[in-house]
Amino acid sequence: MHPKRTLLALAIAAFFCASAAASTELAQKNNCLACHGIDKKIVGPAFQDVATKYGGQKDAAATVAEHIRQGGVGRWGQVPMPPQAQLSDNDAKALANWILAGAK
């Protein structure tokens, strides 16, 4: 492989690893993991279940980000999810994309 292509591939891999780590940190920082497990329901649905439900839908990331910021009740049962209005739009979108990617 050409050295420039190798560097580009490494840079892309580093970016995606950093994005995943940043989103994991965002989830921890904002106490998302207190109610949501990666692969199992706690109080709210598992992130992987959210990814299954919304994956492939048009504007899934925007929809999930909106649900994160606004909270709600009735999508997954009667336990309400409190709004996370303190999150910036960028952080909500980062979390939504991370969740839709299986929270990995």
Image (cartoon, rainbow, N blue to C red):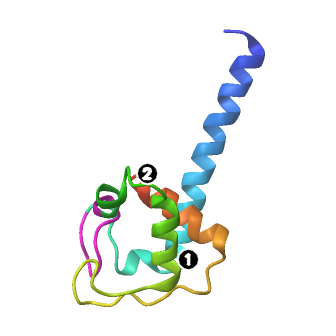
* Closer to the camera in the image, 68 or 8: 68
Q: Main secondary structure of the magenta part?
A: loop
Is residue 104 visible to us here? no
Is 86 above or below relative to 65? below
Is residue 44 shown left or right of residue 67?
A: left
**Alpha carbon of mark 1 to alpha carbon of mark 2: how far?**
19 Å
83 part of magenta stretch: no
42 part of magenta stretch: yes
**First reached walking from the N terminus: tag 1 or tag 2:** 1
Question: Can you identify the residue that label 2 sits on?
Answer: 101
Magenta part of the protein: which range? 40-49
Q: Tag 1: residue type? A: Lys
Q: Residue furthest right?
A: 4
Q: Quadrant of residue 47?
A: bottom left
Q: Tag 2: residue type? A: Ala
Is residue 57 visible to us here? yes
Instruction: Give neighbour class at mark 1: few <14, some 14-19, many 20+ (Cα, 10 Å).
Output: few
Mark sitting on residue 67:
none
- Which residue sits at x=42%, y=56%? 100
* Closer to the camera in the image, 75 or 88: 75
Is 22 above or below relative to 72? above
Is residue 29 shown left or right of residue 31?
A: right
Q: Secondary structure at mark 1?
A: helix
Q: Residue furthest front?
A: 58
Q: Secondary structure at mark 2?
A: loop
Residue 32: where, in percent of width, then height? 44, 77
Residue 68: where, in percent of width, then height? 48, 77
Question: Can you identify the residue that label 1 sits on?
Answer: 29
Residue 63: where, in percent of width, then height? 47, 68
Residue 69: where, in percent of width, then height? 53, 81
